[in-house]
Amino acid sequence: MASMRLIFSSLLFSLLLCSIEGRSNIPLTEEEDLELENELQSLNKPPVKTLKSFTGDLFDCIEMYKQPAFDHPALKNHKLQIRPSFQTKNNVTMDEKIKSLLDQGFNDTCPLGTVIIRRTRKEDLIIAKELPKYFRNYGSRYHVLDSSEQNYYAIAESENGRYHGFQSKVTTWALPNVRPNQVSQNQVWIMGDVDGDYDDLNVIQTGWHIDGYQTGCMNLNCKGFVQVSATLGPGFAFTGSDLSTYGGKQAYFGFQILKDPERGNWWLSIVDRNLGYWPKELFPNLDVSKLIQFGGQVRTPNDVPSPPMGNGHSPHEGHGKASFFTNAQFIGEDNQAYTPGEGSASLKTNADAKYYQVVGDPPSRGSWDVGYGGSGGLVAG
């Protein structure tokens, strides 16, 4: 059974953290091999300490000011932000919660002043050549996927507006039927000016990811996302007690993407812990988000039945038996979260309902819960 991992990415500015490992059959020339070795030297900074997770992955404790993000040319004069401007030191609880690190299978912790980063391997960079296929193609009004392969989605979409973020709680599941080279993922897309030119579009993505490569996420050649946590970061796996069971215990993780009103950086927090932020320098066209999408997406090679989405069950089966975004809220320009009213968001899918579905129109009152998923099995004709 594949474990589930966090992924974080931002399109068009080379910030891409994704689950990517597996057997690679991509041949390399001597020149390409040397290029990858040089990239590894650049990405894997000398660690203060190295930790090993229960999955066998190595995580390095890197001095905060020496992390790979600061090698990005756009961040040459960037000033590190330790915490969001709207958060005081007294209410920062993220890295004091050492239990979160122990829960990940580590028997030690990273020292003060460092951040924890999953170590990159050459195989990860080789497979990264295929990564563009795993993500949304924002051509044709940014609502379609790459038609050269089987890509399907079931999402909720905001109306065009002005947003400073999104927050929700997501049920976490593991899937047993994701085949090699397939992807099943839960995502949030924070988009900039969707009415402008494609080349000028800035997008932030975050979510969790299950794939047939059965590995973790990692910082590829993506220098840019600034990490501030020494206990939690991209690449951690959800397993065991972190996963939901059908008709039984439900496991959730809460997350928030929020623009800092003073510094302009886009902060990511998971279960009330600040992981880090996407610096504003990487997003000249994302002063505000004009469109937000969230839900499920799958990808499979041609002529191979598509994988399950969510937990593989229809969202019509309800809470406790399907995948849900619960208490989904947009964040306005005043940095306050709110539940959108009726008619202010829509549900979209590009597959027949017998394969994938999405349910949960914005309510007239109460919490907004959006369910998505399906058994898959669709083969393109």
Image (tube, rainbow, N blue to C red):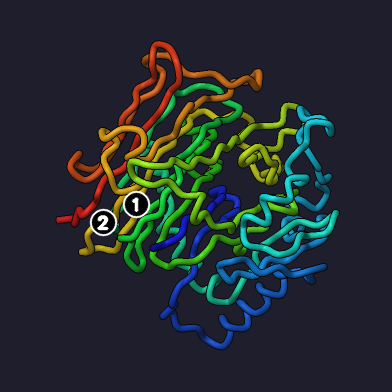
Q: Residues within 10 Å of mark 2 (few under 14, many from 20)?
A: many
Q: Position of residue 22 (x, y in %)?
A: 45, 73
Q: Which three-letter amino acid code belongs to the residue tagged 1?
A: Val
State left or right for residue 181 relative to residue 47: left
Query: Measuring 81% from the left and 57% from the top, which residue is drawn there?
Result: 114
Residue under numbered circle 2:
306
Nearer to us in this view, 201 or 67? 67
Q: Circle 1 — which element?
A: strand
Q: Residue furthest left?
A: 381
Residue under numbered circle 1:
298
Quarter residue 133 falls in: bottom left
- Which numbered tag is attached to residue 129? none
How many marks do you count on the picture? 2
Q: Are marks 2 and 1 in contact (CB under 8 Å)?
A: yes
Q: Quadrant of the C terminus?
A: bottom left
Q: Circle 2 — which element?
A: loop
Nearer to us in this view, 309 or 104? 104
Quarter residue 33 falls in: bottom right
Q: Residues within 10 Å of mark 1 (few under 14, many from 20)?
A: many
Q: Which three-letter amino acid code belongs to the residue tagged 2?
A: Ser
Query: Measuring 82% from the left and 30% from the top, which residue is drawn there?
Result: 88
State left or right for residue 310 relative to residue 164: left
